[in-house]
Amino acid sequence: MSDTPLLSLSGLTKAYPGVIANDQVSLSIAPGEVHALLGENGAGKSTLVKMIYGLVKPDAGQMRMHGESFAPAEPHAARAAGVGMVFQHFSLFDALTVAENIALGMEHAPKLGALSRRIREVSETYGLPLAPDKVVGDLSAGERQRVEIIRCLLQEPKLLIMDEPTSVLTPQEVEILFKTLRKLSAEGTAILYISHKLEEIRALCDSATVLRLGKVVGHCTPAETSARDMAEMMVGSALQTPTRAGRTPGDVVLSINGLSAPSPSAFGMPLRDINLEVRRGEVLGIGGVAGNGQDELLAALSGETLSSPGMISFEGRDIGLLGPTPRRALGILSAPEERLGHAAAPDMTLTENAMLTGAAREGLERHGLLDWAAARRFAQKIIETFDVRTPGPGNAARSLSGGNLQKFVIGREVLQRPELLVVNQPTWGVDAAAAAAIRQALLDLATGGTALIVISQDLDELMEICDRFAALNEGRLSEPRPVQGLSVEEIGLMMGGAHGMEVAHV
């Protein structure tokens, strides 16, 4: 790793109305260095990398690449200078093949035959097997990420920016990714790595810069710093660990018997003969590689998709033909994975988004009239209780960082005192302190008698808060098992496709 910086930032500043996203940020990255960018949600990480990638123009400060002034006016200019970026949210077209998707992201794409050969060559070189003629809609989440990475590698970047790259991967897929990144690093490619998974940072990164409220507050060597110490650098205070109160699960709240349903999406996963019981005060964890029926299961439980009579009952009542609103009135609440566009309407204010799901249980409507003053109070309560970083409830949902919107969405459901809460990826993309707060809120609900189903790809999360665990694979659900005594390795194999759960007993 060279001592001469590949990229250096000096005094970068970017302000938006009501907030300074980056305040005099300076850092440098050497060729071959794997550099972590750490910080709470809203600390300024996304704005910083958007300036490097040409999506945002800084108000002040300077960037230099190879010692020369670097000020990309758009991503095309950044890519031409050797900067590649793999975003947290994939930008792929399901109906197109791998090669066609990659061609769309290239300025001067070769003919598909030549491009396909190049995709195979690069994917084999870096240990990321990828078939260029496969339709993207048929790929797993891990394979979709490979498409994004290969698209970047074909441009031979000198700096690769990765934003939360392991959030949808199994432990086995994470190891493959890390081998690829280490190979790139050894070849001289610098990597700027954003993740809230601090043990991964410790295993992969050479150095780290910590941001808090838009400012650089510290640097560290991750291998020599504990995950807890890094988390406390990020938040500026001691980190609270979620605690579980002793509890005994009560009566069965939810019964699922032979639930089968087609996917509403052409590229979704149908549910196949799912059987399950969840008790009051219990936290049931459901793991699985993304795309194995998680969204379809949440839709079936929330009432977004209806099911045949006899398949789903709540407190002894058949609810298969009830839609979302009557289910919410009964106390069945949910928070889907896709927070912007599904859990929240992007262009609506936080007050309006609070009204969307809280109208019935929070008494925000009377005699057909909406009580907007009460809705604002409810939105403000969510903001304060869950430390949502926003100027106020009048701001649009899309104005929040991903992690802050996640806190709002989860808080909105938790504060409605559900009888049954189904959440998919509750702490996806949130920092360590916020994740701990969300997990504690879920545990507190269970202590109060709420039944919870937590769907997550974060194995540490499932082990920390769940009483029992089941794995979704190809739309089938394994027999739930007590979390106690179940290893992360066993769960990882189950998520990766082991059926029949024989592996869980090895």
Image: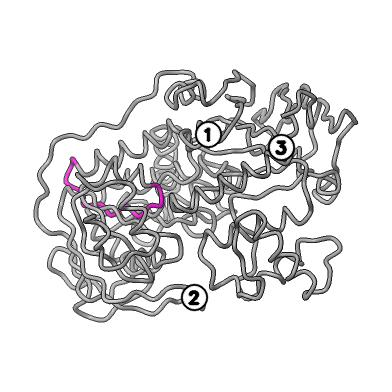
Q: Which mark is residue 190?
A: 3
Image coordinates for residue 109, horizontal then vertical, percent: 83, 66
Q: Nearer the viewer, residue 298 or 108?
A: 108
Is mark 3 in CB contact (under 8 Å) with mark 1? no
Colour setup of the view: one colour
**Circle 3 SS class:** strand
> Could you tell me the amino acid type at mark 3?
Ala
Quadrant where the image shows the N terminus: top right
Q: Amino acid at mark 1?
A: Ile
Instruction: Return the residue at label 1.
Output: 201
**Residue 443, visible in the rendered structure:** yes
Region rendered in magenta:
447-458
Q: Is residue 238 above or below residue 196?
A: above
* Circle 2 residue: 265
x 32%, y 45%: residue:
414
Task: Say left or right for 273 vs 158.
Answer: left
365 and 480: which is toward the camera? 480
Residues at marks 3 and 1, CA–CA distance in whole angstroms = 15 Å
Q: Which is more N-terminal, label 1 or label 3?
A: 3
